Image (tube, grey):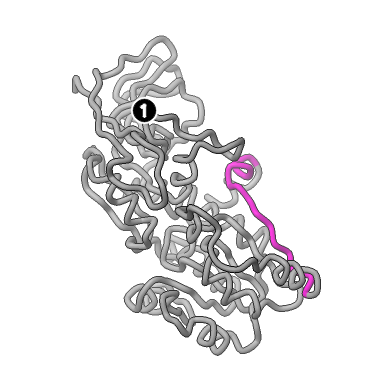
């Protein structure tokens, strides 16, 4: 308890990040000042959005990570020392402590984690990824009973929840995932009606066969070949919530032909609603409803929340690189420190 390990951004990636883009450093344990807390990280969330923040780009939904700075990330943390009136030692909180063992906080942005039997779920299905699925699908996608919903990255942290909520709303759900094992999991464990392998060269034809009545809602987090297969099948008045485009996060230049004119013609002629959203904008108005509904669905077994757990902070860079390659099944979390 005298050393703080932290993983910092060592270099800006060119394409897919490499382990050399990260550096493990050690620093003295920080001490809380008046009104501050010392947090000890128990769980660290790894999410695709972190790849965007490794780039030095213009204004966006969050500031880029500076070279030499600790990688950003949501955490479930334990209050180790408190000089803050609202928190006591031993409290468990959801924080943004980043890729490190310990962090100081003035209490801003902390959420009580509550008495969860599985605290890491506060970073997954009961946290930001689940909330992303809830808002994007229900507020933008607005699926109705009998409609067809297609979900990219169907066994990831967001997609797995999207598909299960869509089924609860009476929709027919077709997932797209990476490999037969993931597709089998989506159908047998998550209750999808069908799931297709995005690596299949016949994806477009097989998706058309799986969606004989077209697609009413496409939850977009992937882009690339998946979007190209979905695009021709979108129905009149289809809705497309957009929370990401992971297939392009590591692109060095825009590949392939320019499909924008054809897509714009489709948007117009089929009256398609395509809306991007950043989940940070919705916490004040929708998080309480999400937390209530999701807790009830998990408690009664309507929704399952798969996790992929990696032990050890030092393994976070390699696990993150694997996430960008689709190697995880469910929400990817790092077990940093035991309680």
Q: Nearer the viewer, residue 94 or 175?
A: 175
Asked if one can make out residue 267 in the rendered structure from this viewpoint, the answer is yes
**Residue 216 percent across, percent down from the top left:** 67, 75
Q: Nearer the viewer, residue 235 or 136?
A: 235
**294 on left or right of 156:** right
| In magenta segment, residue 159 | no
| In magenta segment, residue 282 | yes
> Mark 1, residues whose alpha carbon is within 10 Å: few (<14), some, or many (≥20)?
some
Q: Residue at the location (30% across, 27% down)?
A: 102
**Residue 299 percent across, percent down from the top left:** 43, 60
**45 on left or right of 269:** left
Q: Residue at the location (57% across, 79% down)?
A: 172
Helix, strand or loop at mark 1: loop
Image: 327 above or below 18: below
**Residue 69 percent across, percent down from the top left:** 38, 28
Asked if one can make out residue 170 in the rendered structure from this viewpoint, the answer is no
Q: Quadrant of residue 262?
A: bottom right
Which residue corresponds to mark 1? 68
Figure quadrant of the N terminus: top left
Image: 86 above or below 317: above
* Figure disc tally: 1
Q: Residue at the location (32% across, 32% down)?
A: 78
Image: 153 above or below 90: below
**332 on left or right of 231:** left
Figure quadrant of the C terminus: top left
Q: Which residues are magenta?
A: 270-284
Q: Quadrant of residue 324?
A: bottom left
**Residue 295 percent across, percent down from the top left:** 47, 55
């Amino acid at each position: 308890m005298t050393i703080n390990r932290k993983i910092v951004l060592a270099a800006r990636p060119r394409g897919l990040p490499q382990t050399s883009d990260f550096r493990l450093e050690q620093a003295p344990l920080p001490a809380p000042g008046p009104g501050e807390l010392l947090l000890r990280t128990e769980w660290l969330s790894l999410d695709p959005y972190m790849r965007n923040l490794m780039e030095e780009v213009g204004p966006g939904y969050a500031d880029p990570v500076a070279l030499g700075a600790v990688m950003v990330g949501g955490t479930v943390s334990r209050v180790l020392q408190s000089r803050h009136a609202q928190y006591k030692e031993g409290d468990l909180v959801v924080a943004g402590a980043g890729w490190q063992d310990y962090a100081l906080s003035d209490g801003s942005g902390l959420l009580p984690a509550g008495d969860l039997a599985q605290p890491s779920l506060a970073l997954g299905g009961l946290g930001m990824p689940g909330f992303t699925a809830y808002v994007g699908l229900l507020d933008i996608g607005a699926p109705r009973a009998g409609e067809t919903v297609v979900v990219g990255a169907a066994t990831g942290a967001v997609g797995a929840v999207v598909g299960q909520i869509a089924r609860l709303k009476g929709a027919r759900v077709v997932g797209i995932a990476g490999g037969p094992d993931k597709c089998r999991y989506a159908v047998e464990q998550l209750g999808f009606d069908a799931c297709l392998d995005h690596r299949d060269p016949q994806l477009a034809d097989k998706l058309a066969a799986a969606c004989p009545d077209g697609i009413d809602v496409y939850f977009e987090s992937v882009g690339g070949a998946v979007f190209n297969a979905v695009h021709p099948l979108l129905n009149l008045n289809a809705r497309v919530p957009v929370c990401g485009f992971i297939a392009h996060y590591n692109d060095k230049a825009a590949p392939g032909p320019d499909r924008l004119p054809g897509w714009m013609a489709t948007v117009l002629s089929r009256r398609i609603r395509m809306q991007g959203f950043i989940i940070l904008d919705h916490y004040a108005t929708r998080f309480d409803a999400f937390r209530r509904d999701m807790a009830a669905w998990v408690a009664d077994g309507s929704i399952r929340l798969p996790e992929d757990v990696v032990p050890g902070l030092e393994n976070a860079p390699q696990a993150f690189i694997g996430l960008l390659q689709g190697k995880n099944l469910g929400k990817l979390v790092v077990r940093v420190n035991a309680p």
